Image: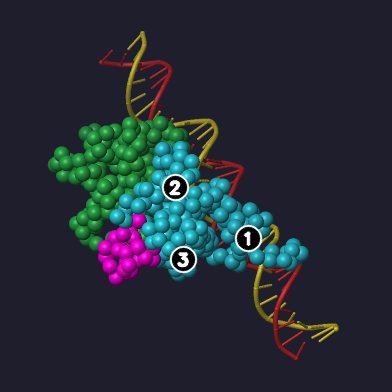
Chain colours: A green, B cyan, C yellow, D red
Amino acid sequence: MTEEKSAYHHGDLRAALLGAAETVLADTGIEAFSLRRVAREVGVSHSAPAHHFADTQGLLAALATEGFTRFLNAMQARQRAAATQDARALLTASGLGYLDFAQGSPALFQLMFGSERVDFCDPMLDRASTAAFDHLAQDIARLRGVSPYDDPAAMADVMAAWSMVHGFAALLMAGRLKPVQAMDTPEREAFFAMLFARVTP
Amino acid sequence: MTEEKSAYHHGDLRAALLGAAETVLADTGIEAFSLRRVAREVGVSHSAPAHHFADTQGLLAALATEGFTRFLNAMQARQRAAATQDARALLTASGLGYLDFAQGSPALFQLMFGSERVDFCDPMLDRASTAAFDHLAQDIARLRGVSPYDDPAAMADVMAAWSMVHGFAALLMAGRLKPVQAMDTPEREAFFAMLFARVTP
DNA sequence: TGTACATCAGTGAACGCGCGTTCACTGATGTAC
DNA sequence: TGTACATCAGTGAACGCGCGTTCACTGATGTAC
């Protein structure tokens, strides 16, 4: 802990910018997102970010990359908490983790899945988002006893499960699933688990 | 057809602005969307739109409203084309219409479901989006023989179906369902119908 | 039928704003000797 | 251990741009008489 940093050199501006970017995203929406805004949030001159990110796209790609990592973590955390080896229960846990992330970081979720501003050609981002997809594929592999990459029916299961949880999360975030919004957390989770289970009979 | 309009008065600027707004949205994305840009597209001074829309939000709300109407039309058109009374086939047709719309008007779809810039408090917009939701609810009512507004299980069916088709459409549009994108149209539709049927057993 | 007047629809100049980008700079840090 | 120098990280002024908003205007249309 070298708290006593010089005032001039920030120390870890890159991380600070990423953190502030998330705050700005959450507070003002992606429409108002700008490099200058993020620099102001950190309390640094507006040209400082250039040393860490080429432009707004670069920052957003890095933020989305971090988002996918945390997204994957959210699914894994639920699975750990479930403390089970049951393939079905593990798949459900992933779905609940998916929702945890969407509800916990709605701005990031929107960025990762709904924004035209992020460049998915970025290799880091591609890797992170693929890893998240692979996690769901593994859940299905465990359930079906065959890898989705080898078996079209299992791949169909992956896409069905993904579509369901993603649609549920997206509509919930968009405020278009009013009956669900009225539920408390345990009820909502049970409700989702019921719907989610239908999809992989 | 009074083609010989005066050069000064446009004739139907409101409609022209809505049309141009869709073009701008499709061409440059919602990030670059501005009232000035739309006015330029129409070939009119940048202050002209003020006579028809209070601001960008107003234009976007009107555009999203039109979007929901066309969205509903797309579902109904598929049902008409199916030429059947079978409740299950009609539900599937709605799902395919949902996809038709998303694929045919991706920018509008994104605006309607993914943008923070549209104000869902607008009463016209609320009415149009509710009508689209009600359409799906009616499909389920036909299938279950009971209105989802009276029966929680039927309402669960509505939300399951909606989540599935929306997630599928959204992921497809975001380019994240690569195996599906590789399919030709009939194959893709059969694939979707198969997934969609799982959700309302 | 003609005229006067009100209203409506669109114009274009002006404003202030935040943005991204550039650039010469300066302060801090690391390294060679 | 000290000094000189290169490199890195952040500054702040300047630029041109497109934006939304305002405002006095003008051209076209509709209506009253």
Q: How crowded is mark 2: few (under 14 residues within 10 Å), some or many (20 or more)?
A: some
Q: In this view, does A72 lie above or below B90?
A: above
- Rendered image quadrant of residue B142: bottom left
For mark 3, give the secondary structure.
helix
Q: Is residue D6 above or below residue A79?
A: above
User: What is the three-letter code of the residue carrying label 1?
Assistant: Ala
Give coordinates of residue A130: x percent, y percent.
35, 35
- Which residue is depicted at the point 52% across and 48% down? B29
Give coordinates of residue C33: x percent, y percent.
36, 8
Tell me the residue that label 2 is attached to.
B189
Tell me the residue that label 3 is attached to.
B128
What is the residue that sits farthest to the left in this orientation?
A83
For mark 1, give the secondary structure.
helix
Q: Residues within 10 Å of mark 1 (few under 14, many from 20)?
A: some
- Which circle's residue, 2 or 1, is located before the other in the chain? 1
Q: What stretch is highlighted in magenta?
A: B137-161
Read off the chain for label 2: B
